[in-house]
Image (cartoon, grey):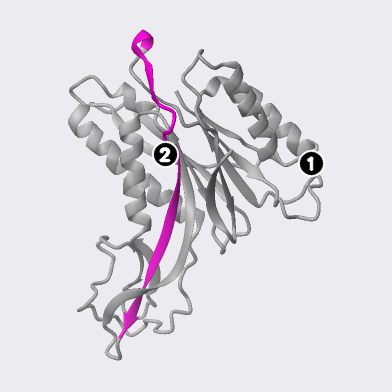
């Protein structure tokens, strides 16, 4: 079992934490205990599992010669980070995170061509995307902006969509190999929470990605669905029996103009200690924090 909790908070460096202060920051908490098996056969295998990942982001900018040919993409125009955590099937979770790490290390800006008389535009795409421009022999149309002044900003929505795509690819692989083995249910409860912090946005943003099952199709089809988490919501994955209590703490801290991450951290520690040996949550409590101008960082609590 896992506990993952994510929510919003005020800037800890603000002059005051008064009621109504902007929720510009975000946090994730998780435990570090890893267990395997089911029922009475379930056992702890590690107290050092990494359940929150800091994901570096790099976007390459095309370098053009005078003929309008892209010669390379060695210049990063944006470097930053976001945070991701999951609860559920370990194999599926780690596979998606590995794919997401690869995706965000190789993003590129590319010029999307246009029809006659219609200006083209830049897009952020995966380097191996069919939209990505060749490094050596692609010639652009006459509308291209060589000064790169109109590059689109990286947003949380773009990152959430990329995670959704990587999640869907992993799900499709699971369907391909496990559909006839009767083992789909063990993957269905795998959920992700993504925390983004981009300079182009005034506050951190939280997204939840989960699996939806379409029973109207034969065989049943699994789809990755992503939702933006509103500032008044708290995400709890894994040990969902704690949701009501943690949500109450979250809302009370906001109503009393207290910093929510401190209140959640205190209650989580109390819950973990009081249920030691009764479930498989434990080990080291870790916290990830996100702010628009400093990216995402993870520390032990």
Q: Position of residue 267 (x, y in %)?
A: 66, 27
Q: Which residues are magenta?
A: 39-64
Name above or below for residue 183 compared with residue 131: above
Q: Residue drawn at (36%, 59%), measured in percent from left and top?
A: 105
Query: Residue 160 lies in magenta, yes or no?
Result: no
Q: Which residue is mark 2?
A: 225
Name above or below for residue 38 compared with residue 252: above
Residue 215 appearing in the image: no
Residue 114, located in which quarter of the rendered image?
bottom left
Residue placed furthest toward the top: 40
Q: Position of residue 259 (x, y in %)?
A: 72, 42
Q: Is residue 276 left or right of residue 211?
A: right
Q: Residue drawn at (74%, 38%), measured in percent from left and top?
A: 254
Q: Residue drawn at (26%, 80%), measured in percent from left and top?
A: 71
Residue 153 appearing in the image: yes
Secondary structure of the magenta portion, mostly? strand
Q: Nearer the viewer, residue 18 or 139?
A: 18
Q: Is residue 13 left or right of residue 32?
A: right
Q: Nearer the viewer, residue 299 or 142?
A: 299
- Label 2 residue SS: strand
- Label 1 residue SS: loop
Q: Which residue is mark 1?
A: 257
């Amino acid at each position: 079992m896992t506990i993952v909790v994510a929510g919003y908070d005020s800037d800890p460096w603000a002059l005051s934490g008064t009621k109504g202060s902007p929720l510009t920051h975000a946090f994730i908490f998780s435990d570090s205990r890893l267990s395997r098996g089911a029922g009475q056969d379930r056992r702890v295998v590690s107290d050092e599992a990494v359940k929150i990942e800091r994901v570096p982001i790099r976007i390459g900018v095309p370098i053009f010669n005078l003929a309008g040919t892209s010669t390379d993409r060695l210049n990063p125009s944006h470097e930053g980070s976001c945070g991701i955590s999951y609860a559920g099937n370990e194999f599926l979770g780690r596979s998606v995170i590995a794919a997401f790490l690869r995706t965000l290390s190789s993003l590129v800006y590319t010029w999307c061509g246009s029809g006659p008389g219609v200006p083209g535009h830049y897009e952020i795409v995966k380097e191996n995307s069919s939209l990505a421009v060749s490094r050596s022999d692609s010639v652009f149309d006459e509308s291209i902006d060589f000064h790169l002044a109109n590059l689109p900003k990286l947003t949380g929505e773009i990152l959430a969509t990329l995670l959704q795509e990587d999640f869907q690819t992993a799900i499709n692989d699971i369907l391909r190999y496990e559909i006839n083995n009767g083992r789909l249910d063990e993957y269905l409860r795998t959920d992700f929470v993504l925390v983004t912090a981009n300079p182009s946005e005034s506050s951190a943003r939280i997204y939840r990605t989960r699996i939806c099952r379409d029973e109207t199709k034969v065989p049943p089809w699994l789809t990755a669905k992503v939702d933006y988490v509103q500032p008044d919501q708290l995400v709890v994955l894994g040990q969902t029996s704690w949701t009501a209590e943690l949500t109450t703490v979250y809302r009370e801290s906001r109503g009393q103009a207290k910093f929510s991450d401190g209140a959640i951290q205190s209650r989580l520690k109390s819950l973990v200690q009081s249920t030691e040996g009764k479930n498989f949550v434990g080990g080291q409590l870790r916290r990830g924090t996100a702010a628009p101008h400093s990216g995402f960082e993870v520390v032990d609590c």
